[in-house]
Image: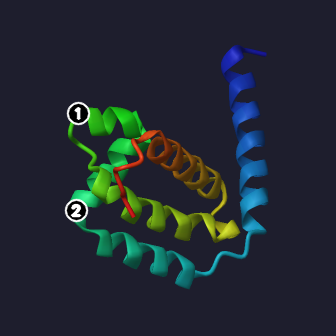
Amino acid sequence: MSLNVIKKIMNSSVESKDNEEYSNIPIDISDIINICKEYSKLGGNIQNQIDYILEFGIEDGIKNGLVTQQSLIFIKNFLQGISNNPYFGDSVNQSQEVIFLIKEYESSLPKNIILN
């Protein structure tokens, strides 16, 4: 059996397990629509900041001027909406990680800087 055949068999096995796992998750279309509406309300500027944070991190984004401290509260609130819905799968964990990192960043700021 060639390496390519083995890879195809393994990939199809993984794909079927993934499809099986997620087909039992009762996500409702209204959940998706609601989170899309909330994302849309953020506006392009904050949406871009979320993208930057997910790709490069909070501190790097702020150092480079691509993420503002004032936006962190809006980003945190949006991500909290995702993390409150367990049916969003792995995105729940990802949003919780980013919320944690934002809180860590905020706690590292001098006490005289208030973001909330």
The residue under label 1 is: 64
Q: Which mark is residue 15?
A: none
* Residue projecting furthest to the bottom: 30
Residue situated furthest top in the rendering: 2
- Residue in view at x 30 percent, y 69 percent: 42
Which residue in the protein does label 2 denote?
44
Residue 66: where, in percent of width, then height?
23, 42
Disc 1 to disc 2: CB gap under 8 Å: no
For the residue pair 103 and 13, the one nearer the viewer reads as 103
Residue 25: x and y, percent? 74, 69
Q: State which quarter of the image contains the C terminus.
A: bottom left
In the image, 72 versus 88, the foreground residue is 72
Q: Position of residue 52 (x, y in %)?
A: 33, 43
Residue nearest the viewer, comparing 22 with 9: 22
7 over 71 or under it: above or below: above
Name the amino acid, label 1.
Answer: Asn
Secondary structure category for the residue under label 1: loop
How crowded pointer 2 is (Cα within 10 Å; few <14, some 14-19, many 20+) is rated as few
Displayed quadrant of residue 38: bottom left
Q: Quadrant where the N terminus lies?
A: top right
Structural distance between the alpha carbons of marks 1 and 2? 18 Å
Residue 112: x and y in percent read 35, 50
Q: Residues within 10 Å of mark 1 (few under 14, many from 20)?
A: few
Point out the tag, 1 or 2, that comes first from the N-terminus.
2
Vertical arrangement, residue 60 with respect to residue 107, above or below: above
